[in-house]
Image (cartoon, grey):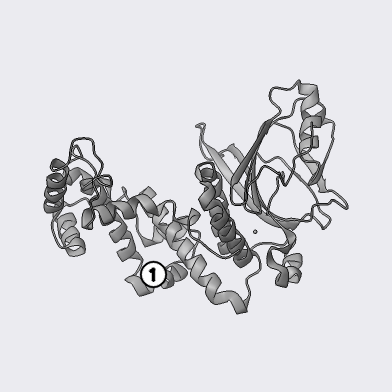
Amino acid sequence: MPALSHTNPRTAAGAVFVQNFSTKDLPPEDQFDAWRSLLSDTIDLLPTQATSGSFAAEFSSWTFGNVVLTRTLYSDAPARRWRHRPRSFLDHWCVVLARSHSPRSDTLSLETSRQDNLSFRSLALPFEGQAEDTEVLTLFLPRDFCRDELEDFEQAHDLEINPQLGALLAGYIENLARQLPHISAAQAQGLASATRSLVAACIAPRVERSEAADASLTSLLIDRARLVVRQNMASPEFGPEQLARLMAMSRSKLYRMFESTGGVAHFINRERLREAYRRLCSHRDAPSIHVIGNEVGFVDHSTFSRAFRREFGHSPSEARERSLTKLSARPFGLSQSEAGHQGTASSAAADGREADNTLLRRPWPGLIDAGHEE
């Protein structure tokens, strides 16, 4: 089969171009050779005695702007050895998020634990590696995406990434893999620019661009914190300490990040109340106010009502009555956005709906195209 191409004449500027490949439908004796051919532009996958049998793997790549994200899944593949191809015509940078899943040693159940490893490398520089990862996400960026900082990036080749910045970048790459199949052509170019900027800020941060980088990173961290809160807000015990742990961030840094907006606890409480408002006003058959309060982490109904009134200026029951009045005034089945409604309820609901996609729509200045393994 032909090797994977990092550019394609059918890829329009700003569009998302998708490629997929799997060895599963090939005879077992042909699977490794097909996979090796697919990756031959970026790495030399070295045959071993173990690779002479079946080698089941799936590959997907998304090209957006001049950036490429690839995802590789290994379901029945032995340990692999590879090296960067000498004198390859490709000299891209690659950010690799490799994952392995293994049974948990502290339980008798079928639960598995996940280990993530993030690395940054240049395809133009020598590298050899081996792994038994079950999933690999790789970002490819053109060599000149930061022309003035080539030396900084070359020094970062295969070096350990700052843990906090690495956690942020890994979360962003994971979110890309989930969202890219749904990204429109109009959003793709801005997404490529945002990705380039984030990689530059995380891999080779510099004093002269620290203000711009800090602003972008802080915004991304807040978006990530909002997602973590929404995933855990049903637990009344969820608070700043748990958020810091799930964000892989020190409590002091987390407190500094929210200091100017009222603090971490205020942020968590406000996200709970905004989600409660969205659920109260979402449709005619929403659960009771008491149930919604419990769902967002309020055990006591009176505490929930007082906090809700402080945040929005009226009680939960008044918010629901206003929403029901507006819903009743519209033809049945017509959505709030279709009816042209604006105001507090629709604004709060829109905030809730939009937050999860903020990472993928923020226009930043800046990145490549390609496919890869590890």
**x%, y% of residue 138?**
66, 48
- In the shown orientation, is residue 91 left or right of residue 347? right
Q: Which quadrant of the structure image shows residue 311?
A: bottom left
Q: Report crowding for label 1: few under 14, some 14 to 19, many 20 or more residues within 10 A (C-alpha).
A: some
Label 1 sits on a secondary structure element that is helix
Quarter the N terminus occupies:
top right
Q: Which quadrant of the structure image shows residue 61?
A: top right
Q: Residue at x 33, y 52 (%)?
A: 352
**x%, y% of residue 309?**
16, 61
Most foreground residue, 120 or 11: 11
**x%, y% of residue 6?**
73, 46
Q: Which quadrant of the structure image shows residue 120?
A: bottom right
Above or below, 172 against 261 in this view is above
Amino acid at the residue labelled 1: Phe
**x%, y% of residue 7?**
72, 47
Q: Which residue is mark 1?
A: 258
Most foreground residue, 222 or 166: 222
Q: Residue furthest top?
A: 27
Q: Residue at x 76, y 70 (%)?
A: 151
